[in-house]
Amino acid sequence: MHFAFDQQQLEFRAQLQAFSHREYTPGELRAAWDSPTGWSEERWRALAEMGVIGMTVPAAHGGLGMGPVDLVLLLEELGRAAAPEPVLETTLLGVPLLLAAAPTHGELVARWLARVAQGTAVLAVGTSTTAGVPGAVGADLLLLERDGEVHAVEPVAATITPRRSVDGARRPAQVLWQPSPATLLVSDAGRRGVLGALGDRAAMGTGALLVGVAERMIAMAARYATDRRQFGKPIGSFQAVKHHLADALVRVEFAKPAVYRAAWSLAEGDADASVHASMAKALASDAAVLAARTALQVHGAIGYTWEHDLHLWMKKAWALAAAWGDAAAHRARVLEAVAGA
């Protein structure tokens, strides 16, 4: 099978890359860590104007009506920028959950989809298998699963308690809520496709973010290795440093096509989409963790300091590697599927 991104998808990524270079400076990222929600409402609206937030929203509700393959490059770019805005939770996870409820809750779904496309609504998604609900702090609507049922919960009807995270811009929260006055959107009893697809999308999307984060850390380490001199020459000229960076880069390059394959499988409804999503998450998690370790080793003592920018990406890698199932959990899932257990 031949797979390649089309010109429109590549141009969209280039536009987002230019936006990221302007908006996601280390100073802005540090400011996000200190903000109440961990992200910027102004940047959220700007991303919505570009079409990023409403990419998966049908055109009838003001979006672009695109799918995972169109979004995967953008998630990768947002990871490279360490963008704190909850695009994954809203665009890749929340919107499809709302669409699944459209046959029975058309008016409610239409209202929220339009708001998402306009950039005036943020969605947060949580399941009984996640330790916290990422993006719950500052969200306008919570889509929460309990006992195979997905409910729409207004933040005012829930108790949201932020939890500590190694990534200061990622604010998972404990959410306490009751089925009433929540709205039952989807009952998954007897048709596990809704929740299964949610987990697969989360694995693929998190993998895409991790690829971008990993590439950025490797680039930072390579640049530092060029600037830092020891024994009268750049440390990047030392064979050991070259090998460490090359090993990390190879791991990322192996993860990248797996992520793209997972996005394609999800878009096409491939029967093995779950396996492909787990392969993508496992490979991307391993690659990002190795990239973080390598970048820290290359930077030496300065990489441990709060003042250096490396930790903004390194901590995001650690948080995302554990989110929606770590590498070990997804490898076990692949093994189970392959072995037929």
Image (tube, rainbow, N blue to C red):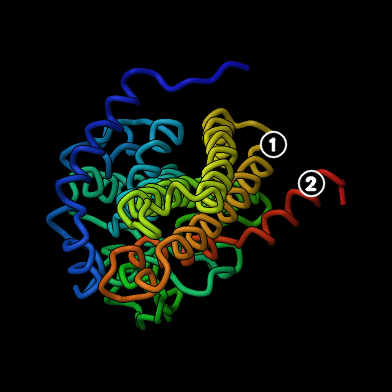
Q: Nearer the viewer, residue 173 or 289?
A: 289
247 with respect to 96 (left or right)? right
Secondary structure state at the residue bearing disc 1: loop
Residue farthest to the front, as pictured? 232
Distance of label 2 from label 1 (alpha carbons): 9 Å
Q: Residue at x 29, y 64 (%)?
A: 309
Q: Residue at x 58, y 16 (%)?
A: 2
Q: Can residue 301 be seen? A: yes
The reply to whether discs 2 and 1 touch (Cβ–Cβ < 8 Å) is yes
Q: Can residue 194 be seen? A: no
Q: Residue 286: give x, y in percent of width and height.
A: 59, 55
Q: Which residue is mark 2?
A: 337
Pointer 2 or 1: first along the chain: 1
Q: Which residue is mark 1?
A: 272
Residue farthest to the left, as pictured? 42
Q: Residue 197: give x, y in percent of width and height.
A: 57, 46
Tell me which amino acid carries mark 2: Ala
Choose top left, top right, bottom left or bottom right for residue 136: bottom left
Q: Nearer the viewer, residue 18 or 92?
A: 18
Q: Residues within 10 Å of mark 2 (few under 14, many from 20)?
A: few
